[in-house]
Image: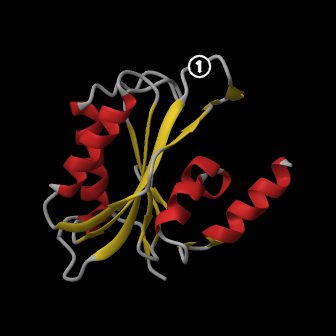
Amino acid sequence: MNVRLAHGLDAAPRSAPVHAVVALGANLGDRHETLAAAVDELRRLSLTEDVRVSAPIETVAVTLDGEDEDAPRYLNAVALLETRLAPGELLASLHRIEARHGRVRRERWGDRTLDLDLIAYGDEIITRDDLVVPHPRAHEREFVLAPWLSVDPGAEIPGRGRVADLLARLREGAA
């Protein structure tokens, strides 16, 4: 397992593709159209290929205070891709896609036209001010785990375990 801490490690493309996981979510505007357009843009990223996407699921909004039944519902999906982009460049590309779709970062966990989160980048564990991978709350989010599992039944979150097991535990705890 690789631990990357310095910004300088992000500059050059990788010599071999890395399997990356991106979570997509939207709860404002035409959510279906926005997710479809974002997936199109993921497929056109340089040094990226073999983009596979889950079917979208609809979920209740989660805020800093917990679930908010009164907020617009989210449409969530997960994309798996093979990329030679360095993790920082992939994250910057995700932010550019969000911005093109009107994403404004006003409030943490607020409503949004598009949210793209880098969930995993190979088996790497990255801890920096601007990037933490695997995503620190992915293992707690059914809206990440369920779509991910649907496109990759053998998926694992580095340092956390199999996605199927994490989802089962999450669902057991909610019952």
Name above or below for residue 96 compared with residue 42.
above
Q: Quadrant of residue 35?
A: top left
Q: 58 or 6: which is nearer to us?
A: 58
Tell me if residue 134 can be seen.
no
Q: 119 or 7: which is nearer to us?
A: 119
Place of residue 90 in the rendered image (x, y in percent of width and height, measured from the top left)? 27, 57
Q: Quadrant of residue 162?
A: bottom right
Tell me if residue 106 can be seen.
yes
> Number of labelled discs?
1
Residue positioned 78% across, 62% down in the render: 169
Name above or below for residue 1 compared with residue 73.
below
The reply, left or right, for residue 54 in relation to residue 33 is right
Name above or below for residue 1 compared with residue 88.
below
Place of residue 29 in the rendered image (x, y in percent of width and height, measured from the top left)? 37, 21
Q: Circle 1 sits in a helix, a strand or a loop, which is it? A: loop
Q: Quadrant of residue 18?
A: bottom left
The reply, left or right, for residue 50 in relation to residue 138 is left
Residue positioned 24% across, 40% down in the render: 37
Q: Which residue is farthest top?
A: 70
Residue positioned 84% across, 53% down in the render: 173
Name above or below for residue 173 compared with residue 10.
above
Q: Disc 1 residue type? A: Ala
Near mark 1 (Cα within 10 A), the count class, few <14, some 14-19 or many ≥20, is: some
In the picture of the structure, the residue carrying the numbered disc 1 is 71
What colour scheme governs how the chains and residues are painted in the rendered image of this protein?
secondary structure
Place of residue 73 in the rendered image (x, y in percent of width and height, measured from the top left)? 55, 27
Place of residue 53 in the rendered image (x, y in percent of width and height, measured from the top left)? 37, 57
